[in-house]
């Protein structure tokens, strides 16, 4: 009475409950590595069969879960990279601050040097003036 007897060679179950019972029984008793994990309705023979393949939903969920895990790993990597970049930026800022501090010290030293050069010029001028006065007083003493 089967309309398409050659299309389905798998064991047929009249309903889902019967099929699932057998899935559990085989899972517990079979020593094979490839055992059925679920039942499915066959539109060809209108019965239920067993399969070791995961359903489309489970396969898709696993794929999505894997993608999520990869995305998490990528996010972790980006966060770590961002942290490293921030550290580098902070180091650059610290170096810039050191350079600014050194430039300010240099400006102060330059001012000091300018002051010392001016002081030296004043002292030279005073020294010249003192020598002139001294010579003048010596000349006057000779005359007198
Ligand atoms: Zn079938």
Image (spheres, helix red, strand yellow):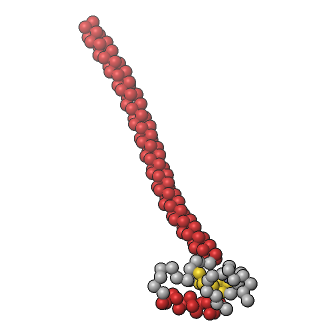
User: Outermost residue toward the top?
Assistant: 143
Q: Which of 17 and 114 is in front in this view?
A: 17
| Residue 122 spot, x, y in % from top left | 38, 25
Q: Nearer the viewer, residue 59 or 71?
A: 59
Q: Residue at x 35, y 18 (%)?
A: 129
Q: In which quarter of the image is the N terminus?
A: bottom right
Q: Which of 19 and 108 is in front in this view?
A: 19
Location of residue 106 with respect to 79 vertically, above or below:
above
Q: Which residue is drawn at 40% across and 36% down?
A: 109
Q: Which residue is drawn at 59% across and 78% down?
A: 54
Q: In which quarter of the image is the C terminus?
A: top left
Q: Which of 60 and 87 is in front in this view?
A: 60
Which image quarter: residue 59? Answer: bottom right
| Residue 119 spot, x, y in % from top left | 38, 29
Asked whether residue 108 appears in the rendered view, the answer is no
Asked whether residue 21 appears in the rendered view, the answer is yes
Left/right placement of residue 3 relative to residue 59 reads: right
Left/right placement of residue 128 relative to residue 44 reads: left
User: Outermost residue toward the left?
Assistant: 142
Which image quarter: residue 143? Answer: top left
Left/right placement of residue 72 relative to residue 112 reads: right
Q: Which residue is drawn at 68% across and 80% down?
A: 6
Q: How many labels does the image show?
A: 0
| Residue 50 spot, x, y in % from top left | 60, 84
């Amino acid at each position: 009475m089967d309309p398409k007897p050659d299309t389905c060679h798998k064991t047929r179950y009249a309903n889902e409950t019967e099929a699932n019972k057998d899935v559990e029984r085989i899972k517990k008793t079979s020593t094979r590595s490839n055992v059925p994990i679920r039942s499915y309705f066959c539109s060809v023979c209108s019965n239920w069969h067993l399969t070791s393949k995961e359903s489309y939903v489970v396969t898709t969920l696993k794929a999505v879960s894997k993608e999520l895990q990869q995305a998490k790993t990528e996010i972790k990597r980006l966060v770590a990279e961002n942290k490293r970049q921030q550290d580098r930026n902070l180091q650059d800022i610290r170096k810039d601050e050191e350079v600014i501090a050194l430039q300010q010290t240099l400006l102060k030293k330059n001012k000091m040097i300018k002051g010392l050069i001016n002081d030296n010029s004043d002292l030279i001028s005073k020294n010249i003036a003192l020598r002139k006065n001294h010579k003048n007083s010596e000349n006057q003493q000779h005359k007198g």
